[in-house]
Image (cartoon, rainbow, N blue to C red):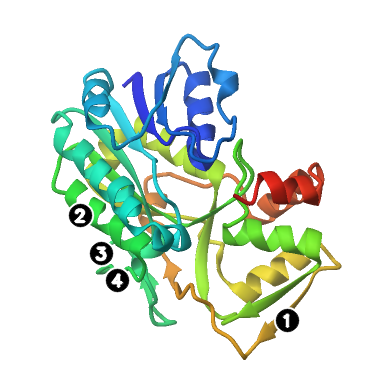
Amino acid sequence: MKNVLITGGAGYIGSLLSDTLVNLNYNVTVVDNMYFKKNTIGHLIIKKNFKFILDDSRNKELINELLKKNDVIIPLACLVGAPLCDKYPIEAKEVNQDAIVHIIKSKSKDQIILYPNTNSGYGSTEKDVECNENMPLNPISIYGKTKCVVENELMQNENVTSFRLATVFGSSFRNRVDLLVNFFVYNALFEKKLVLFEPEFRRNYIHVRDIVNTFLFAIDNFDSVKNNIYNVGLSSANLTKIELCKKIKEHIKDFNFEISHEGTDPDKRDYFVSNKKIESLGWKPKISLDDGIKELTQVYKLISKKDFDQNYQK
């Protein structure tokens, strides 16, 4: 399993994953349309075991050719998050769903697909419910629905694994501020304040580098993880939004937040997630929420607010 194809390999997760695999001497091919125009993988171009193709994951002819040459496929290309998918619903279906279903239907029996699904499929659950992999999914956004359609198609095949990823946080070669922890830390540092709507909504969290480590774990232990679905998150970080704010305030003392009862949060996701299944295989996250907040605080301090708003808010 030395040849790895990553669609969306220049993105938030993909750039870190590409860098890690290349440095572990995997032969890595990345297909990315560079939608966000960030130079996240330029440092890899000189590497002999890295190939970059500026193209779109919806290019079926290209994908068909690349499938002939790769053992592991990690389809990361995606319109990520409910707001972006709501804005571009046709593109969301084409990229998040149709392009990946094409890969699934075109792969050989022996080829491996490691699929990044999301906790978003759990939608909104009762407060005392612990979401495990056997629960029926109830996505409440276009984003979540496209992900669940793909997972359903995926699991009808052999040599596949789906990871239902918690909400990601942390710094990468392409930083994102739209993710909840990253956004809250940004506001705590630069704005010093935040207004919370529906503060008791709960989510699980995971550092972006631990997602990279999850893919490595799957490659190294594929016989153990294959043909299965796993929640992937920090079991110590099933937190409500107000609990998250309190945690951030431990690190940024002049951060103030308040609860508003006059509005609602358009994001209705609310769930407590169990990660026991993947933990039972020996998988463990390496980066705590506290360490991630410290990291983000230091990274954000390296960038002026003006530069951050211009270059990292997209």
Q: Amino acid at mark 4?
A: Asn
- Eye-nearest disc, 3 or 4: 4
First-in-chain label (2 vs 4)? 4
Please determine whether, in this image, residue 129 is positioned above or below residue 288.
Answer: below
What secondary structure is marked by label 3?
Answer: loop
- Eye-nearest disc, 3 or 2: 2
Q: Position of residue 158 (x, y in %)?
A: 16, 39
Q: Which residue lies under the disc numbered 2?
A: 152
Q: Is residue 82 visible?
A: yes
Q: Residues within 10 Å of mark 4 (few under 14, many from 20)?
A: some
What secondary structure is marked by label 2?
Answer: helix
Rounded to the nearest whole Å, what is the CA distance between mark 1 and mark 2? 40 Å
Q: Which residue lies under the disc numbered 3?
A: 134
Q: Residues within 10 Å of mark 1 (few under 14, many from 20)?
A: few
Q: Which residue lies under the disc numbered 4?
A: 138
Q: Amino acid at mark 2?
A: Asn
- Eye-nearest disc, 1 or 3: 1
What secondary structure is marked by label 4?
Answer: loop
Q: Position of residue 216 (x, y in %)?
A: 43, 33
Rounded to the nearest whole Å, what is the CA distance between mark 2 and mark 4? 13 Å
Q: Quadrant of the N terminus?
A: top left
Q: Which residue lies under the disc numbered 1?
A: 258
The residue drawn where x is 56% and y is 62% is: 236
Q: Residues within 10 Å of mark 2 (few under 14, many from 20)?
A: few
Please determine whether, in this image, residue 293 is positioned above or below residue 77.
Answer: below
Q: Amino acid at mark 3?
A: Asn
